[in-house]
Image (tube, rainbow, N blue to C red):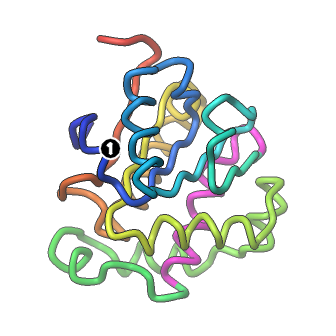
Amino acid sequence: MTNGVAELENTDTIFIIGSNTATAHPLVATRIFRALEKGAKLVVADPRKNQIAEFADLYLQHKPGSDVTLLNGMMKVILDQGLQDQAFIDANTEEFDGFKALIDGVDLDACAAATGLTVDGIEQAAALYAKAGTASIVYCMGITQHTNGVDNVKSLANLSMVTGNIGRESTGVNPLRGQNNV
């Protein structure tokens, strides 16, 4: 984890993808529920509607294997709408122009078709994540235990860097394992 579990309580937006946190990681879920009680927004993306999705401000039930497409669509919205943290990008990333050119080529209608979502849903997820003062990503085995697992994790890291939601308190990319204390 790039940040401590306790920091989730003070996050403005939590993006959970590929994780049934409430069932698999109840102590982490407790921190997330405390954040929600304080007014945090919750975005959940998972092909299966799980227990934590019941509490989401936005639930995205995307097709299995379409995680990278969803994340690229979110980054397309963020860059097109100028929601990126350009100062963070300039200070902390390399080869951003090449990355941006790749994302500029993303077609949101094609993303929607490939993920089974609507363009509006992708746009809402991007806005909730990018406009937050602090946003944390939480993911689990639904992201890593897949043929695209490495690309899924890289895309989550890219999303956090595009918005500057890493390296600060109550932000970060926070993987959970399949079992506690692994």
Label 1 secondary element:
helix
Q: Position of residue 102 (x, y in %)?
A: 52, 73
Identify the residue shown where x is 61% and y is 46%: 44
Using the image, determine if residue 140 lies above or below residue 77: above
Give left or right: position of 15 versus 170. right
Q: Residue furthest left?
A: 91
| Residue that label 1 marks | 8
Give the class, few, some or many, for how many residues have Cα within 10 Å of label 1's Cα (few <14, many ≥20).
many
x and y percentages locating residue 68 in the rendered image: 59, 52
Q: Residue at x 45, y 71 (%)?
A: 130
**Furthest residue in direction front, as rendered:** 37
Residue 25 falls left or right of residue 161: right
Point out the stretch of residues depicted in magenta: 63-79
In the displayed structure, would residue 83 be above or below residue 181? below
Label count reads 1
- With 65 as the anchor, is 18 left or right in this view? left
Q: Is residue 174 above or below residue 39?
A: above
Quarter the C terminus occupies: top left
Asked where in the image residue 32 lies, by quadrant, the reply is: top left
Q: Main secondary structure of the magenta part?
A: helix
Q: Position of residue 30 (x, y in %)?
A: 41, 29
